[in-house]
Image (spheres, rainbow, N blue to C red):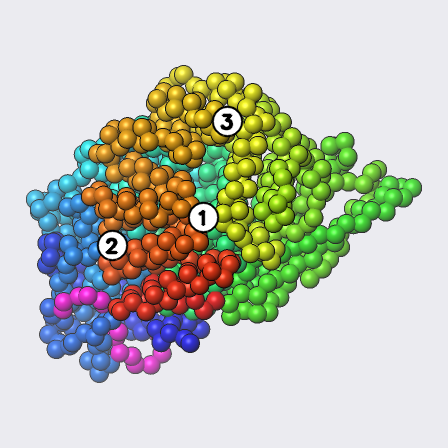
Amino acid sequence: MTDPRTVYLSDYRPYSHLVDQVDLTVRLAPRATRVDARLHLRPNPAARGRHVLRLDGEDLRLVSVRLDGTLLDLTPDDTGLTVPADLLPEAPFVLETTVEISPETNTALEGLYMSKGMYCTQCEAEGFRKITFYPDRPDVMAPFKVRIESDLPVLLSNGNPVASGPGWAEWHDPWPKPAYLFALVAGDLVAHRDSFTTRSGHAVDLAVWVRAADIDRCAYAMDSLIRSMKWDEQTYGREYDLDVFNIVAVDDFNMGAMENKGLNIFNSKLVLASPETATDDDYARIEAVIAHEYFHNWTGNRITCRDWFQLCLKEGLTVFRDQQFSGDMRSHAVKRIEDVLTLRARQFREDQGPLAHPVRPESFVEINNFYTATVYEKGAEIIGMLKRLVGDDGYARALDLYFDRHDGHAATIEDWLKVFEDATGRDLTQFKRWYSEAGTPRVTVSEAWNPGPQGGTYTLTLTQVNPPTPGQPDKGAKVIPVAVGLLNPNGDEVVPTTVLELTKGSQSFRFEGLAARPIPSILRGFSAPVVLERAVSAQERAFLLAHDTDPFNRWEAGRSLARDMLVAMVAKGAGVSPAWAEALPQLVLDDSLDPAFRALALRLPAEDDIAQTLHAAGTVPDPDAIRAARRAAATALAQRLAPHLPGLIAGLTDSGPFTADARAAGRRALKTAALQLLARVDGGAAAEAAYAAANNMTEEVGALAALLDIGKGAAELARFETRWSGNALVMDKWFALQVALAAPDQAAAVTRRLTERPDFDWKNPNRFRAVIGALSGNHAGFHHAGGDGYRTVADWLLKLDPLNPQTAARMSTAFETWRRYDAGRQALAQAELRRILAAPGLSRDLSEMAGRMLAG
Ligand code: BES
Ligand code: ZN
């Protein structure tokens, strides 16, 4: 059953016309904003023949249309306006439209809308059509002039400011851009200012715009921006290209942030930070997202996407770039581990279920549903593999060629791969399957050892299996770079990291002249987004945990030990593994290691990860058993470490002033992890003391979480609320923690109680996500056998959908794993998905998601 609204990659055609210039005048009024658009158009020589002029437009009240000054009598339909071919000159012409829109009643937060008295826009992917009639597609690029009229004191748009007076401002963006990068902001805002001089000497005025009350929480965002600008010059040779760069923080925002040319718009949670209100994770996220949106100026804006099927061209590459940046700013080892944790938790999960799709999909119904972990995170992994295959120099040459060849254009994945082929001479035909085929390859390993007089030969045989995904039953072999190192039994590295290229179904690789049978360290640095399937003894994992020179695989060894143990506990009723319980404390107490790394080693696989592993192995996961096993393991570890924990915590307690750098954050992360373990054996005494003593948000929520996790913390919750009730971003944490850490049979009830509070502002996406997202993320709570978790989430998705379909659809992925579970749970989840799909007036966004989840 295909939806008649499906869009196909294979249907791409160039647009009928070129837009040489756009002049917009926007007269702001809450319910009757007037938009005058003057489009300078001419027939596109690349689109042969005579064409109608089709402009996209939704929810617009058309006032007038003029062609070269002559009034036309045209009536738009639901999705746009057509000017018949016989009215159109075969030479350049000017089309003027006037429309009226109502930002105040725009609850979808797409197009022009209002948030707390301020006007702002979100146009990606297809929001510009809710502002004016326009060819709203990324391959139509034009310079924009914008005049804003409003009594509000700050009026911003893309590009450089040209002129302003009381009640108006004019902006000019000289760089041709697609409409999705258009932005406009008007409000009573103040600026945190700084400046940056590019390496060719161009001075850029920088500003972070916020409400007056937030002005003292902008410094970190500004600092991150300046470091991003410098980094992109040093690492990619990319300079900024306008006189100003503005960032605006908005409270009501569907996504994290948006890279509009010269005027980035951010969810305020990704701008505002102070030690008292932001956690270390918030700081790291702000740094990464500021960088990400800034880096889009070249990878996304100067070079954009031909169509939305090419989304990974900008998003995968820009995520890869922001990951490199965060690694350079902090620790590459820690960043790689965190990125792989996210990849497995979100992208592998997606790839395993009904929503699996290629990094470059071939069709979609609603493009907003394809801003996925696959497009972003797997898209970034593909670029990491390319870099590994062609080397750092090859990568640098390919990127230089990319910027050179495609600047100012709308490009495709074919263009992207071609620059690598041309710059390095490598044939990427087979590699391209990574873009077109969904699913996570599984790589199995077998070993052979032949001792000999000139040293022994060790043979590794790698085999890949590419599992079927919806619509793609059969797949070809992928090019998989497998980074391998070999260790001697005494722990010395005998073969340093070498990249093996697996290109066939099965292949053997030989290492000769070895004195002893080596212990292999495979998939170092997580060199490819695959599942490595290899039965390894606990002893060998413990050996790698102690000796591997590759920090990622060292962490992975501990992770695998824990995973194997938890799977055995759940599936076979096994007890806590002695190998794990002995090896882990040694690592955690090793002061020569980075505290951030030790904190990551302490983190047990999440309940959903364990369910994913069980499901992949053909076992039906029992959420209650998974939760019980995980908690039993944590308690066993806590008991073993108990004598050392108070000393560890004391040694990690810093008395000086707060700093947000990676070193200090790593110490706080390990301290918090230790505190959460200690709570399992001391009844929460240390966590209560830590809560009382906390002078930063990381330690405040860390201690509170430790208490809630053992069923305590009521007094602290009340104190937290009293202290922070005036700060919505901090209160989001308060809402989320209670639901995330509620007992499985309480999770839905806690959610219901919180949603009845007057401060549960469910139209605000951050607050909605804090509560409903936390319920979806509470594995045993969401999958509670009574079905109240499923029902509560479905109720809220249905309530949100008519107002904000985009956020409702995104959050519906809570249900993407429903087929993993037992028949009883499956029936309950399926009934909720069917109830959603049957709802009258359901949005295209949510109906596509519910339909795919039921079908796949
Ligand atoms: N271009 C996107 C924002 C966007 C996403 C607009 C979906 C419209 C629909 C932006 O560059 C982005 O990717 N933002 C991410 C954060 C980023 C660090 C991965 C986001 O908003 O979550
Ligand atoms: Zn992006």
User: In the figure, residue 371 lies in which quadrant?
Assistant: bottom left
Q: Which residue lies furthest to the bottom in this view?
A: 86
Q: Does any portion of residue 514 appear in the rendered image? A: yes
Residue 484 percent across, percent down from the top left: 68, 45
Element carrying mark 3: helix
Of the residues shown, which amino acid type is indicated by label 2? Leu
Q: Nearer the viewer, residue 566 or 410?
A: 566
Of the residues shown, which amino acid type is indicated by label 1? His
Of the residues shown, which amino acid type is indicated by label 3? Val
Q: Residue 779 carries which label?
A: 1
Q: Does any portion of residue 530 appear in the rendered image? A: no
Range shown magenta: 45-62
Residue 731 percent across, percent down from the top left: 28, 37
Q: Nearer the viewer, residue 3 or 424?
A: 3
Residue 398 percent across, percent down from the top left: 53, 52
What residue sits right under mark 2 in the picture?
Answer: 109
Q: Which of marks 2 and 1 is nearer the N terminus?
A: 2
Q: Which-is-in-front pick, marks 1 and 3?
A: 3
Element carrying mark 1: helix
